[in-house]
Amino acid sequence: MSVSAFFQLNPDQQRQHLYAAVKQRLELFDNIAYSTQNVVFNPQQNLILFPLDGPFSVPPVTDPPTQMNKEYSVKRLNDSYHKQIRQVWPYLPRFDSNPVQESEFFYDASRGRYQRMTLVREHKQAVIAPYEDWVNQEDRLEYWGYGTTKTRGVYFLSDAAHALERLLWFSGNSQAPNESILPGKLNDLDTITLTFKSDLPRQVNQRGSLTVHFDPQRQFLPVAYLLERMEYRDGFSRVRWFEAMRLLDAVQQQGHWFPSRFQWLQSGGLPTADGLVAAYDVKVDSIAFGSVSQDELAFTFPAGIDVTDNIRGVSFTADGNGGAQGEIQGIPYLNLTYLRVLLRRYFPKTVIPVTIAGLFFIGWCMRRQRPLTDFEQAV
């Protein structure tokens, strides 16, 4: 479908076509395996017009490297996943080397069990927890799939789906939503743009909008997005958060158009040459859909690594077979570590609402039992 043919449809048909395409793309992440290479650096360029004016330049490879390199290998099955990450840090004179960090993550959604293992130089650390760490959410290709902007990253496709759901709900309603679908332009490429609000719940003084560009001739493949959040204080406004992505190359894999290279940047203000900007150049080495089984996700801590189990509140040395060698430190479920994790997990969602409801109920009971005034009796 061409852009002109898309805009010959009536507004309801436009929303339905775009919504169906976005949902189908999100469903690819129900069963996906991929590997990526990421070059991470501070571009020190004026990129306030990115992504509309083209890609940014990537520094040449140097010896020793002056930028960070990250390699991701990811397998995801619905909400469960297995990730392997290798990070090579920029050259550090005090170590006379480029520190290498290797991490492995596993999350079993059915059991609410999260495992993380990190190896940095001689230091080894392993954790079992009932919640995920933010560390594993740095994979830029993951932001094409699951999640919401309430977490650390901007999952622009999931947010676009929610915006389109609102547009479909408001169809025929007199109340105008904050979303719009309009023709767009990305250099010589005609696109379809979806623009909608993008606010963080806890930052009420910041207001922003996210615009996603879609290419309808490649199954509505997202080719760029731009997020700007403004901060309003004392009658003045300034860009408080800037984030953008631009697709450079795409391939058709198993009948689906998917990115093979894209660029992404993030800045706490406008991305100027003298600002602190995180820029990613991402290459997708491999991609496959529908090939992941549950058995491929799990991994076992290697023998000899020290493990902290925050679910049971104990620590032990792994035996390499899923168990412990030697003594287990701490009494399972009867210690301060377990209680602290339990409060962290359930206090905001359960204890606080129950306490508030209990206070309202006590107040209602006390009001019913107090003596009536003369006026109330007369009434």
Image: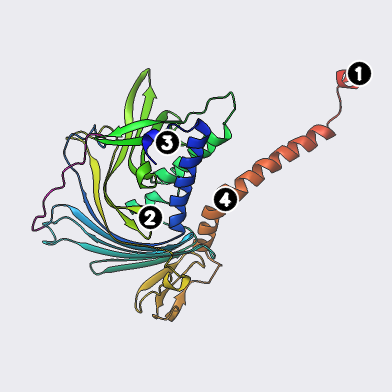
Amino acid bearing label 4: Phe
Residue at screen point 23% across, 67% down: 121
Taking the image as shown, residue 361 lies to the left or right of residue 243, namely right
Q: Residues within 10 Å of mark 1 (few under 14, many from 20)?
A: few
Instruction: Identify the residue position indicated by label 4 in the image.
Output: 347
Q: Determine the CA span between mark 4 and mark 1.
A: 46 Å
Sequence-first tag of 3 and 1: 3
Element type where label 3 sits in the image: helix
Sequence-first tag of 4 and 1: 4
Q: Determine the CA span between mark 2 and mark 3.
A: 20 Å
Considering the whole magenta stretch, tell me its main secondary structure: loop
Q: Mark 2 vs mark 3: give the one in front.
A: 3
Amino acid bearing label 1: Ala
Position of the N terminus, as image quadrant, is top left
Contact, CB < 8 Å: mark 4 with mark 1? no
Instruction: Identify the residue position indicated by label 1 in the image.
Output: 378
The percent coordinates of residue 143 (x first, y second) are 38, 49
Instruction: Identify the residue position indicated by label 2 in the image.
Output: 256
Taking the image as shown, residue 289 lies to the left or right of residue 53, namely right
Of 240 and 324, which appears nearest the observer?
240
Total marks drawn? Answer: 4
| Above or below for 348 versus 51 | below
Amino acid bearing label 3: Phe
Q: Determine the CA span between mark 2 and mark 1.
A: 75 Å
Element type where label 1 sits in the image: helix
Sequence-first tag of 3 and 4: 3
* Residue 172 inside the magenta-drawn segment: no
